[in-house]
Image (cartoon, helix red, strand yellow):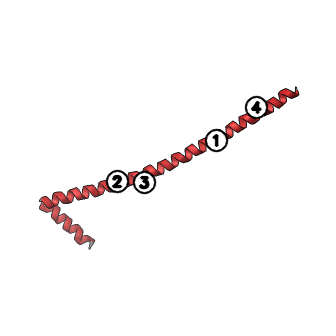
Amino acid sequence: MFMELLFGFIKILLDGDQKAIILLLIVTIIILLLDRNRIIKEKIEKDKKLEKILENYHEAVIKITEAINSIKNVLIDIKTKL
């Protein structure tokens, strides 16, 4: 079935008439659509990775801020005891 279809496409291309041009355009459109879908999937994956990186950055900033505030409180306690 597939081979018959493939040989039919090849025959149309070798004939070189209007059908060949239409077939080439259809094949080109299909290839471009497949490539577009691949690019969209890659973009979605990159966006997910970027969101994860930003989330981790935000969590790290919060933890650093908490640590600095804790150090500040310890320094204030030490200062009051002196």
Relative to residue 3, is residue 68 drawn left or right? right
The disc label shown at residue 43, or none: none
Disc 1 residue type? Answer: Ala
Is residue 72 found left or right of 35 in the rendered image?
A: right
Q: Residue at x 48, y 48 (%)?
A: 47
First in sequence: mark 1 or mark 4? 1
The residue that disc 2 covers is: 35
Q: Within 10 Å of the Cα at label 3, are there few (<14), some (14-19), or many (20+) other Cα atoms? A: few
Q: Which residue is mark 3?
A: 41
> Where is mark 4, residue-wise?
72
Res. 80 image quadrant: top right
Q: Vertically, is 46 above or below 70?
A: below
- Which numbered disc flags the more N-terminal residue, 2 or 1? 2
SS for dot 2: helix
Q: Earlier in the sequence, mark 4 or mark 2?
A: 2
**Label located before the other in sequence (3 or 2):** 2
- Secondary element type, mark 4: helix
Instruction: Mark 2: give few (<14), some (14-19) or many (20+) Cα within 10 Å.
Output: few
The residue indicated by pointer 1 is 60
